[in-house]
Image (cartoon, helix red, strand yellow):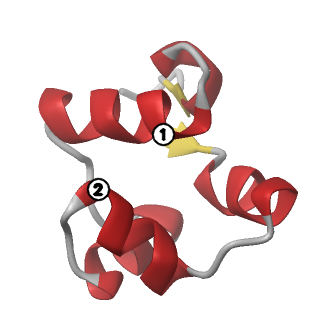
């Protein structure tokens, strides 16, 4: 699974820490997701999508190997 979290953060001009606080996770969790080392739960993916005001599919995409 790949994601556009880093791009969306850049558009909003916020840090990993700021996003983490908004969705109640650690900065390390955001970093791990952006590095494709951690796949978020459905709830976390929904929180991130809601924060950015976009559908989940605009933030997270399945890859052929998923």
**Left or right of 52 in this view: 21:** left
Instruction: Tell whether label 1 touches label 2 (CB within 8 Å).
Output: yes
Say above or below: 64 vs 27. Answer: above
Q: Quadrant of the C terminus?
A: top left
Residue picked out by circle 1? 51
* Quadrant in the picture for residue 7: bottom right
Say above or below: 16 vs 54. Answer: below
Residue picked out by circle 2? 23
Give the label on residue 7, or none: none
Q: Residues within 10 Å of mark 2 (few under 14, many from 20)?
A: some
Say above or below: 28 vs 20. Answer: below
Would you say residue 58 is visible in this rendering?
Answer: yes
Seen at 46% across and 67% down, the residue is 19
Residue 32 lies, in percent from the top left, at 36, 74
Q: Quadrant of the N terminus?
A: top left
Residue 12 lies, in percent from the top left, at 77, 57
* Quadrant in the picture for residue 57: top right
| Element type where label 1 sits in the image | helix
Would you say residue 1 is visible in this rendering?
Answer: no
Residue 56 lies, in percent from the top left, at 47, 19
Residue 55 lies, in percent from the top left, at 54, 13
* Quadrant in the picture for residue 14: bottom right
Front-lying residue, 22 or 11: 22
Front-lying residue, 22 or 4: 22
């Amino acid at each position: 699974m790949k994601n556009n979290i880093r791009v969306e953060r850049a558009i909003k001009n916020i840090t990993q820490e700021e996003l983490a606080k908004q969705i109640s996770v650690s900065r390390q969790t955001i970093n791990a997701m952006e590095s494709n080392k951690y796949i978020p739960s459905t709830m976390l993916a929904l929180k991130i999508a809601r924060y950015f005001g976009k559908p989940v599919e605009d933030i997270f995409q399945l890859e052929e190997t998923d």
